[in-house]
């Protein structure tokens, strides 16, 4: 069929477009601000892109309009529709569907070739864990399909159909495998179910669960209800793999679970009396640790990543792969070659200041929720504290962050920021677009925190305080005004 995708340049919808094209459909799409890299990726696939949401797109006469959740019924100050195309679709009774529903019905559970879906859900770590899992399956020769909200460096693409190799695992399924990052955000303005409800996984990973998305959820209980809706879709011979440290997930499971269950994450270092229903655990530091099933050591993983959160992500991915027949030894070998995901502590560049033996490193990281900020900074601090000494002084961490997500813009988590920034020696906050007082929120940090209303001002502030050997971590779920390269340019001139 010919599908026209509204909001095609988003990570999820762009990946969906690539999968639809690979499936043999004709695909066109539109968005506001069609820009690289997604625009270039889609154009290279032969997908025609249209700027904006104008009525002229009706002339494309597609068989179906696929609507992303960026589209709404909102009006401007003059009362005119912000998305006139969707108004015309509704007025004329033209066929439309949400992106997640189209993906579930036309691809994941197509009667001619249904997949065994492995869905990775959670407030944090979905992209990284999905990437780990897809790479493990690839390394095991299973050639999975996947749709991931980032670019796994082992694959160089965010979505593909896969070759459909059959699983030989312990499940009753002989279906090809598909790994999907399972987001709890809503599907569309007309479909307020979480995206993941449409995926109907046979292997469901619940990585963690905190309050987030304050623009659509009123409380943690609202999100827990959506997670329980996900559990209701897992078949009895499917498996739910959950973080046993999370009380919020235990409460979800108590609402009802009708599938096999495996827990992960009770560290035997910290919990000598590991919970009886916790099967998977780790022993040792996050960059080199034993993987255990109960009390049995099944292997040892030494890899490039650091941070306890990545250790937990690895356990989740190993457990999920094990459900479809991949041995722990195979998973460990794959993860030892795992190259992470773009924008996950990605080193953008290093500049040596004049006359200084140590360079200044600039990183890009996607963290935007206080917990993600905290765990990422703790991971870097642990890595620096255990690295060989490179100079007389302890390396400093400078965190430069943009509260850009809808939740952060609303300020509902601003009180958590001082604690989340605790491992940063200095913190720099962009205040543009905020309805809350960032300077007041960060006041517990005293003279370790600075605020600026624009990216150039923020760069100037950082340059006033930077020293040789510093590690500058730029955190945002957007482009952050290209601050990474602005900082590198300023450092080269210093």
Image: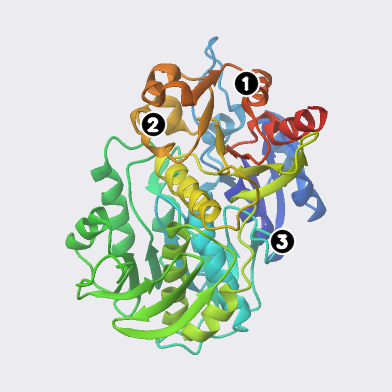
Mark 1 is surrounded, within 10 Å at the Cα level, by few (under 14), some (14 to 19) or many (20 or more) other residues, namely: some
Residue 427 vs residue 16: left or right? left
Check residue 461 in the rendering and tell me which mark sits there, or answer none: 1
Q: Residue furthest top?
A: 78
Q: In this view, does 377 lie above or below 111?
A: above
Q: Distance between the residues labelled 1 and 3?
A: 35 Å
Q: Quadrant of residue 158?
A: bottom right
Q: Can residue 9 be seen in this view?
A: no
Q: In this view, does 92 lie above or below 134?
A: above
Q: Residue at x 76, y 28 (%)?
A: 490
Q: Is mark 2 on a helix, strand or loop?
A: helix
Mark 2 is surrounded, within 10 Å at the Cα level, by few (under 14), some (14 to 19) or many (20 or more) other residues, namely: many
Depth check: give the residue in front, 33 or 299. 299
Q: Distance between the residues labelled 3 and 2?
A: 36 Å
Q: In this view, does 377 lie above or below 127?
A: above
**Is label 1 in contact with label 2 (beta carbons under 8 Å)?**
no
Q: Residue at x 61, y 44 (%)?
A: 392
Check residue 156 in the rendering and tell me which mark sits there, or answer none: 3
Q: Is mark 3 on a helix, strand or loop?
A: loop
Q: What element carries label 1?
A: helix
Q: Residue at x 45, y 46 (%)?
A: 372
Q: Nearer the viewer, mark 3 or mark 2?
A: 2
Say which label, 1 or 2, has the lower sequence index. Answer: 2
Check residue 369 in the rendering and tell me which mark sits there, or answer none: none
Depth check: give the residue in front, 249 or 67. 249
Residue 176 vs residue 21: left or right? left
Residue 31 vs residue 272: left or right? right
Q: Can residue 195 be seen in this view?
A: yes
Residue carrying label 2: 418
Q: Is residue 209 above or below residue 256?
A: above
Depth check: give the residue in front, 441 or 192. 441
Say which label, 1 or 3, has the lower sequence index. Answer: 3
């Amino acid at each position: 069929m010919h599908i026209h995708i509204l909001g095609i340049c988003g990570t999820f919808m762009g990946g969906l477009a690539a999968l639809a094209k690979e499936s043999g459909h004709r695909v066109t799409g539109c968005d506001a601000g069609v820009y690289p890299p997604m625009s270039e990726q889609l154009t290279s696939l032969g997908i025609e892109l249209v700027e904006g949401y104008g009525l002229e797109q009706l002339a494309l006469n597609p068989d179906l309009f696929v609507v992303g959740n960026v589209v709404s019924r909102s009006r401007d100050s003059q009362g005119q529709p912000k998305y006139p195309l969707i108004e015309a679709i509704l007025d004329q009774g033209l066929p439309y569907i949400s992106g997640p529903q189209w993906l579930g019905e036309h691809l994941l559970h197509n009667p001619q070739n249904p997949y065994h879906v492995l869905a990775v859900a959670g407030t944090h770590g979905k992209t990284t864990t999905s990437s780990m899992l897809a790479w493990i399956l690839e390394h095991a020769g299973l050639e999975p399909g996947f749709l991931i909200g980032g670019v796994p460096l082992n694959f160089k693409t965010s979505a593909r159909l896969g070759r459909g190799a059959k699983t030989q695992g312990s499940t009753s399924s002989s279906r090809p495998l598909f790994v999907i990052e399972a987001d709890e955000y809503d599907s569309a303005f007309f479909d307020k179910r979480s995206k993941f409800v449409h995926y109907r996984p046979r292997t469901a990973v619940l990585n963690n669960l905190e309050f987030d998305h304050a623009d659509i959820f009123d409380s943690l209980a609202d999100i827990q209800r959506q997670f329980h809706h996900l559990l209701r879709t897992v078949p009895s011979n499917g498996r739910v793999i959950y973080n046993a440290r999370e009380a919020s997930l235990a409460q979800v499971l108590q609402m009802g679970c009708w599938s096999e269950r495996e827990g992960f994450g009770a560290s035997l270092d910290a919990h000598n009396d590991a919970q009886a229903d916790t099967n998977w655990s780790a022993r040792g530091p996050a960059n080199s640790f034993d993987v255990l099933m109960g009390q049995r050591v099944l292997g040892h993983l030494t890899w490039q990543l650091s941070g306890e959160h990545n250790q937990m992500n690895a356990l989740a991915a190993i457990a999920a792969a094990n459900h479809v027949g991949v041995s722990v030894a195979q998973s460990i070998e794959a993860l030892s070659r795992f190259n992470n995901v773009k924008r996950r502590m990605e080193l953008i560049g290093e500049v040596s200041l004049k006359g200084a033996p140590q360079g200044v490193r600039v990183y890009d990281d996607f963290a935007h929720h206080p917990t993600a900020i905290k765990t990422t900074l703790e991971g870097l601090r642990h890595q620096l504290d255990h690295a060989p000494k490179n100079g007389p002084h302890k390396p400093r961490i400078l965190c430069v962050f943009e509260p850009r997500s809808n939740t952060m813009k609303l300020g509902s988590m601003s009180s958590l920021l001082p604690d989340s920034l605790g491992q940063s020696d200095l913190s720099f906050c962009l205040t543009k677009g905020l309805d809350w007082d960032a300077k007041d929120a960060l006041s517990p940090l005293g003279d370790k925190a600075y605020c600026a209303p624009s990216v150039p001002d923020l760069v100037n502030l950082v340059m006033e305080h930077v020293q040789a050997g510093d590690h500058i971590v730029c955190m945002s779920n957007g482009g952050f005004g290209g601050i990474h390269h602005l900082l590198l340019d300023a450092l080269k001139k210093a």
